[in-house]
Each structure stands twice: as structure tokens, then as C-alpha cells.
């Protein structure tokens, strides 16, 4: 018997139930035992007089008249029964559960869980509680339609009875007793079957700590591996050539850019494996930093790669870097999914033979068919768009190449150290000189023409404009229609002397590239686009950004979109066109008009998240936890991290007997490859 036994070992788990459980990611006894309820119904009975209107509670009483069934409407059936509770006659009604009538025999004691209506002195029943439910709290699990609560509870009970002795204590005893946390056996029991509120809260606190602790354990072990491994590459770059290259740039690097270049170059030269996150607000100039570092790797005799999330961005980087490197005889190649076979084969050969020095591309860079001659350095742009596995795959394309991940989605410091703990962090905390804050205004949809009129004046002065229409997904036909309508409306509005174009993800690649190129060259003045332009796109002459239905985007996305303008010397403007439907969305619009600072926005984003705004989660770059909330439970997260660090400091390889379970846990995680 082992905790890794398949779930089918339990009685009554056939293929159908197993499939339903698999949908909940329950496959083994262990995953079943750690599948915790998301809330509990409080089954403690309380005096009627204490209850407030609509409060959910347990109602215990005596049946004083037999249940009555009545129908109303085509599909509604009501079952009503009169109970004597605390000397008060109370009517309890259940809807569409006529079979419950057998549970109510006159003069019998019953217990019902339901919602109290104070004015009518009645109850809408939710379930009948049988004597078998001994605990005060009834756990409620998230389930699907192929598995019922009851079934899940009985499986958990069965698994617990048979296997609980096998649950090891993963968290070392010293840590556990210091924070008065439950061991795993108690934790599992009290999460599923708490006798009372106190047990439940205690279990939850322990479970959150455990979740954060094990997360940090993985992050820290990666970091320790990176720092200890002497298997990292030493890139002995040509300092003179590098300095010359920096001299040829059309601008002077900002102090922050210089600082991060130094940090990165020191890592390249060092024998330990580099795993660095470069944070910098939109427009802070991360690309040139990456270019300098890639050039350094090339002068050291290695290849460098730059992986980006979209083809448009790959194409843009390719154009810029080709131009930048042409005088230096550095050969740059582009690899995207849409290359024709012949062109693709040529690129693959050049990369494999080492003819290509720098390769730029989308996820195509990590496909199995591609081999590198000697990849020494890899950059991942907009890294929050990639999963850990993709980052790892890129790393495996070379002899442990150094990695630089770049992001414009800043994570507030308290979270950054805990969630990116395995990376060293460099931050560009200033914008190139002369940049003026983008002036942002919010207009209602019926005021949109004001933004268009303003844009027309700016166009006359030489500016270009983006108009972004939201698209839920790139395959969303309804919104695509909206973008097309908007495009036609603007064509009419600006007249034939202004070239307006439409850009969306479903267009053929060649057409997308041609449109983008024409916009970059200024031939197209107004680009109506879906969020394909969201990340990275850099067109310095574009100084007006109109975001239509802006309330449908999260703060991180809005900030990214706005960051497409204000990249040159002229004043840039952003218009949010929106009729937000709720208070949180109104706040999002207001905050956008108040600040241009990505860090301030990230903090605000977290606050709104705390108020239930889950917009743009995939953008915010914060990993998802099952129980703990890294914002609300930040103290626990920080504490768990400190404890993990102390352990690695004392015992980096986790060889001490007290750390045996931790080492085991890590081994299992790596084998399962489900770190993320
Ligand atoms: P991001 O950090 O958002 O990726 P980019 O690398 O695209 O920003 O840079 C934004 C713009 O700023 C580009 O047009 C780039 O050429 C320009 N730029 C970068 N560094 C400087 C600098 N030190 N001085 C002036 N302009 C710069
Ligand atoms: Mg960029």
C-alpha cells in the first residue's frame, strides 16, 4: 500500500468515476487526500432569535404536520413542511426535491440546513442533515456533474481510513512546532472532517503554510542548483568590441540600462549558470540591453537566441537587430511557425552549422526538430507569456546556456522575491530622457467622436494612431466583427486622404507582416488592431492610442497597450473609451488616467484583485495557488520562504535525515514535471 496507489484501488471506483476524478486532477490516493473543500457549511444549531435575515444555518425541530407538495409553473415543485423550532412554528420549503418527503415523519426530530427568512419566519431548505453527519461543519468540495459531493466524501473517508498512517510529515518538525502547525495526518483529517470552527481554521492555516513552503522549496532548490553548478558556461566576451558596439548606438544608454548591462555581463563571464529576470516598464529599453548581451555572447564564440510570444514581435526584433548588427558581421536569422519549408530548412541548417550567430523567433525556437551548434545565451522576451516548461525547453537547446528573461509586467517587490525567487533580478527603473508621461483620458462610448476628432488633428501634425478593439480570443468571431465595423467606421471618418488599416490575428502571416511594415514606415497612419499589438510593438511615431471598450481589459493589459505609444520625443495621448458596468472597472479606468507608472499599477492591480477583480490574471505573472492567496496571505508566504532558505543554507543538498521527506518531495515533483 502506497499513497501513490491509483484511485481505482478504492471500492466503487470504476472507469467512469475514475475519469470524473481525473477531471478534478485526482488520480492517486494522495491527490484525493489533498483535494480539500473550498468551504464548509456551519452545522451548529443556533437559537432562532440570533439569526439575521438570509443567514444560512442548521434548523433542528420536530415535524408538526406531514409535508405538502405543490406545483407551480411548468417545472417547479415545492415541498413544504411545518417544524416546531424553539417553540416557534416554522415553514420549511424545498424546491424541486420532492423525494425528500420521506424524510419528514410527524413527531420525529429532524435537522435541516437552509436559509432563514426573518420577516416571514420561514426557511428555504437546502439539505436534510442525517444523524450520520456528526461534525459541526459540512465540507463542500468543488465537483463536476459526473461525481457527487456525497460520493467524493465517502471516497475521501475510505482513503483516509486506510491510508492516513502512511502520510509522511513533509515539513520538518522544528518548523512545524515553531509555528504550531499540524502534521500532515492531522492536517488532512481536520481539513476534511473538522469537528468545529477552531479545527477548521487551524487546518487551513497549516495547509496554506504547507502549500507555500513546498512552492518555495522548489523555487529555492532551483536557485541553489543554479548557483552551485559549476556546469554553467563561462562566456569570455570581447570587452573592447562590446564597448565599441555601445558607442555606435543612436542614443546614450540610461544609467539604469548601463547598470543592468553590467549585472548581466558579470553573470555571462561567471562560471555559474545565469538565470536572471530583467524587469523594466514598457518603453524602458529592454531590447537594446538584450542586444548588447547577445552580442557579448557572440564575441565569446557562442550563438544567442531571442524567443518572443508573437510573430509580429519576432519580425520587428528581426528587422531592428539585423540593421543594428549588419556592420558587425553578426548574422541574424528569423524562425517562426509560418516559414515555408524551404526557407525553414535553410534556417535550420544555418543554425545547426553555426552560420547563424543570433536567432530570433517564436516558440518555433524550442521545437524538437531544431538543433543549435552552440547556444550559449538565450533571451526570453515578455517572459510571463511563457510557461516554465517552455523556458526549460529553451535552456535544454544548448550546453546549459545562460538565460535572461525579460518582462514589462512588474511584480510588486513583496511578491517578486517569493515568486521569482529562483531568478536573480535586474531592474531598469528609469525611462530614456525626454519621455513625457502619456496623457490619458477616459471617455464614454457616446463621446468616442471627441477622441477621433482629436486624433485627426494629431494626424495632421504627423502622428500615427493605434485603435485597439478587444477580442476575447483570437478565434472570437463576434468581436472580430466589431473590430471590422470599427475599421469601416474610421475609414469613413478620416476620409480617403488618410490610410487606415486593420490588423488581427486571423489574417495570413504575410498580410500581417505587410500591414505592420507599412505602419512602421508611416505609410499607414491609423492602425485598427486587436490585441495582437499588445506586447512589444515599437513604432516611435505612433503617439495616439485609442482603446475601445477599455473596461474589458485588465490593468496589466491596458498598461501594455498604452505602452505602444510615447516612445518618441513628442507628447503621446491615450483614450480609454468605455462604459464600465461595475465599480471595480470604473476604478481601473480612473487609475489609468492617474498614473503611468507600471509598479503603481501593479500594486493597484493586486488591490483590485483583493476586491474580487480577477481580470488579466494570466498577465499579472503571479502563480496560482490552490489554498493560499499570495497577496492576502503574504506574511505566511514570506515566513515559509525564510524557513526554506534557512534549511538550504544549513543543508544545501538536503542530505540530513530531518530533511529526507523534503528531498523525496522534490524528487517526485521533478519526476512528475508539474512544477508551475
Ligand atoms: P521595452 O522595454 O518596452 O521593450 P524597447 O526596447 O522597445 O522597450 O525600447 C523602447 C524605445 O526606446 C525604442 O524605440 C528604443 O529604440 C528606444 N530606446 C531604448 N533605449 C534608449 C535610450 N537609452 N535613449 C533613447 N531611446 C532609447
Ligand atoms: Mg519589449
Image: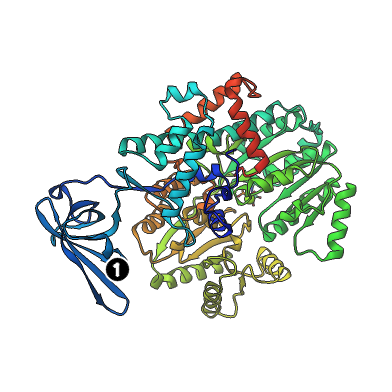
* Disc 1 residue crowd, few under 14, some 14–19, many 20+, Cα 10 Å: some
Q: Looking at this view, is 226 or 539 the one in front?
A: 226
The correct choice, above or below, for 200 with respect to 439 in the image is above
Percent from the top left, x then y, of residue 173? 49, 23
Which quadrant of the rendered structure holds the C terminus? top right
Percent from the top left, x then y, of residue 366? 75, 51
Q: Which residue is mark 1?
A: 98
Asked whether the viewer can see residue 213, the reply is: yes
The correct choice, above or below, for 306 with respect to 450 in the image is above
Residue 313 located left or right of residue 37: right
At mark 1, the secondary structure is helix
Residue at 61% from the left image edge and 60% from the top image edge: 541
Q: According to the image, what is the colour scheme of the structure? A: rainbow
Q: Looking at this view, is 113 or 287 the one in front?
A: 113
State the image quarter where residue 507 is shown: bottom right
Residue 614 located left or right of residue 532: left
The correct choice, above or below, for 44 with respect to 501 in the image is above
Residue 626 located left or right of residue 253: left
Q: Looking at this view, is 107 or 572 the one in front?
A: 107
Which quadrant of the rendered structure holds the N terminus? top right
Percent from the top left, x then y, of residue 92? 20, 61
Q: Looking at this view, is 320 or 232 the one in front?
A: 232
Percent from the top left, x then y, of residue 613? 41, 53
Residue at 60% from the left image edge and 41% from the top image edge: 4
Asked whether the viewer can see residue 625, the reply is: no
Amino acid at each position: 500500500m502506497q499513497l501513490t496507489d491509483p484511485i481505482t484501488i478504492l471500492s466503487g471506483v470504476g472507469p467512469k468515476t475514475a475519469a470524473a476524478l481525473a477531471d478534478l486532477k485526482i488520480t492517486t490516493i494522495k491527490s484525493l487526500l489533498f483535494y480539500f473543500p473550498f468551504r464548509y457549511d456551519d452545522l451548529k444549531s443556533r437559537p432562532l432569535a440570533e439569526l439575521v435575515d438570509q443567514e444560512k444555518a442548521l434548523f433542528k425541530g420536530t415535524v408538526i404536520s406531514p409535508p405538502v407538495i405543490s406545483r407551480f409553473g411548468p417545472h417547479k415543485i415545492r415541498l413544504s413542511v411545518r417544524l416546531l423550532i424553539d417553540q416557534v412554528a416554522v415553514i420549511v420549503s424545498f424546491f424541486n426535491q420532492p423525494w425528500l418527503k420521506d424524510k419528514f415523519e410527524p413527531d420525529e426530530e429532524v435537522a435541516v440546513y437552509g436559509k432563514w427568512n426573518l420577516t416571514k419566519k420561514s426557511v428555504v431548505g437546502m439539505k436534510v442533515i442525517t444523524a450520520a453527519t456528526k461534525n459541526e461543519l459540512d465540507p463542500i468540495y468543488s465537483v463536476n456533474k459526473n461525481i457527487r459531493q456525497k460520493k467524493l466524501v465517502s471516497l475521501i473517508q475510505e482513503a483516509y481510513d486506510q491510508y492516513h498512517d502512511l502520510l509522511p510529515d513533509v515539513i520538518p518538525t522544528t518548523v512545524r512546532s515553531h509555528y504550531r502547525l499540524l502534521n500532515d495526518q492531522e492536517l488532512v483529517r481536520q481539513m476534511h472532517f473538522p469537528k468545529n470552527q477552531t479545527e477548521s481554521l487551524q487546518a487551513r492555516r497549516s495547509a496554506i503554510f504547507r502549500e507555500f513552503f513546498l512552492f518555495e522549496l522548489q523555487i529555492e532548490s532551483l536557485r541553489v542548483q543554479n548557483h552551485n553548478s559549476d556546469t554553467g558556461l563561462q562566456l569570455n566576451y570581447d570587452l573592447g568590441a562590446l564597448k565599441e558596439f555601445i558607442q555606435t548606438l543612436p542614443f546614450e544608454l540610461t544609467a539604469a540600462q548601463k547598470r543592468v548591462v553590467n549585472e548581466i555581463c558579470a553573470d555571462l563571464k561567471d562560471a555559474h549558470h545565469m538565470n536572471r529576470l530583467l524587469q523594466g516598464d514598457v518603453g524602458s529599453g529592454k531590447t537594446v540591453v538584450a542586444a548588447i548581451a547577445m552580442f557579448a555572447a557572440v564575441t565569446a564564440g557562442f550563438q544567442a537566441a531571442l524567443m518572443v510570444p508573437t510573430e509580429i514581435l519576432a519580425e520587428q526584433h528581426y528587422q531592428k537587430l539585423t540593421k543594428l548588427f549588419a556592420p558587425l558581421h553578426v548574422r541574424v536569422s528569423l524562425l517562426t511557425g509560418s516559414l515555408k519549408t524551404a526557407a525553414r530548412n535553410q534556417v535550420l541548417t544555418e543554425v545547426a552549422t553555426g552560420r547563424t550567430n543570433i536567432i530570433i523567433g517564436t516558440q518555433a525556437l524550442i521545437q524538437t526538430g531544431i538543433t543549435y551548434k552552440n547556444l550559449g545565451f538565450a533571451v526570453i522576451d515578455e517572459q510571463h507569456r511563457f510557461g516554465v516548461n517552455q523556458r526549460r525547453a529553451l535552456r535544454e537547446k544548448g550546453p546549459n546556456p545562460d538565460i535572461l528573461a525579460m518582462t514589462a509586467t512588474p511584480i510588486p517587490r513583496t511578491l517578486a522575491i517569493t515568486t521569482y525567487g529562483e531568478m536573480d533580478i535586474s531592474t531598469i527603473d528609469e525611462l530614456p530622457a525626454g519621455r513625457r508621461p502619456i496623457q490619458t483620458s477616459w471617455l464614454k462610448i457616446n463621446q468616442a467622436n471627441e477622441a477621433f476628432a482629436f486624433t485627426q488633428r494629431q494626424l495632421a501634425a504627423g502622428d500615427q494612431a493605434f485603435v485597439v478593439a478587444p477580442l476575447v480570443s483570437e478565434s472570437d468571431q463576434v468581436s472580430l466583427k466589431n473590430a471590422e465595423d470599427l475599421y469601416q467606421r474610421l475609414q469613413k471618418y478620416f476620409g480617403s486622404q488618410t490610410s487606415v488599416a486593420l490588423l488581427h490575428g486571423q489574417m495570413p502571416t504575410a498580410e500581417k507582416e505587410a500591414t505592420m511594415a507599412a505602419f512602421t514606415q508611416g505609410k499607414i497612419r491609423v492602425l485598427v488592431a486587436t490585441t495582437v499589438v499588445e506586447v512589444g510593438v515599437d513604432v516611435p511615431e505612433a503617439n495616439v492610442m485609442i482603446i475601445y471598450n477599455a473596461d474589458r481589459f485588465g490593468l496589466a493589459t491596458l498598461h501594455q497597450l498604452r505602452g505602444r505609444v510615447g516612445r518618441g520625443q513628442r507628447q503621446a495621448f491615450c483614450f480609454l473609451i468605455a462604459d464600465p458596468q461595475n465599480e471595480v472597472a470604473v476604478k481601473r479606468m480612473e487609475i489609468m488616467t492617474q498614473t503611468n507608472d507600471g509598479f503603481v499599477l501593479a500594486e493597484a492591480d493586486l488591490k483590485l484583485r483583493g476586491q474580487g477583480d480577477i481580470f488579466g490574471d494570466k498577465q499579472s505573472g503571479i502563480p496560482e495557488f490552490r489554498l493560499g492567496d499570495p497577496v492576502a496571505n503574504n506574511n505566511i508566504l514570506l515566513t515559509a520562504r525564510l524557513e526554506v532558505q534557512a534549511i538550504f543554507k544549513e543543508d544545501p543538498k538536503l542530505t540530513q535525515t530531518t530533511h529526507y521527506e523534503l528531498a523525496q518531495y522534490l524528487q517526485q515533483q521533478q519526476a512528475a514535471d508539474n512544477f508551475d
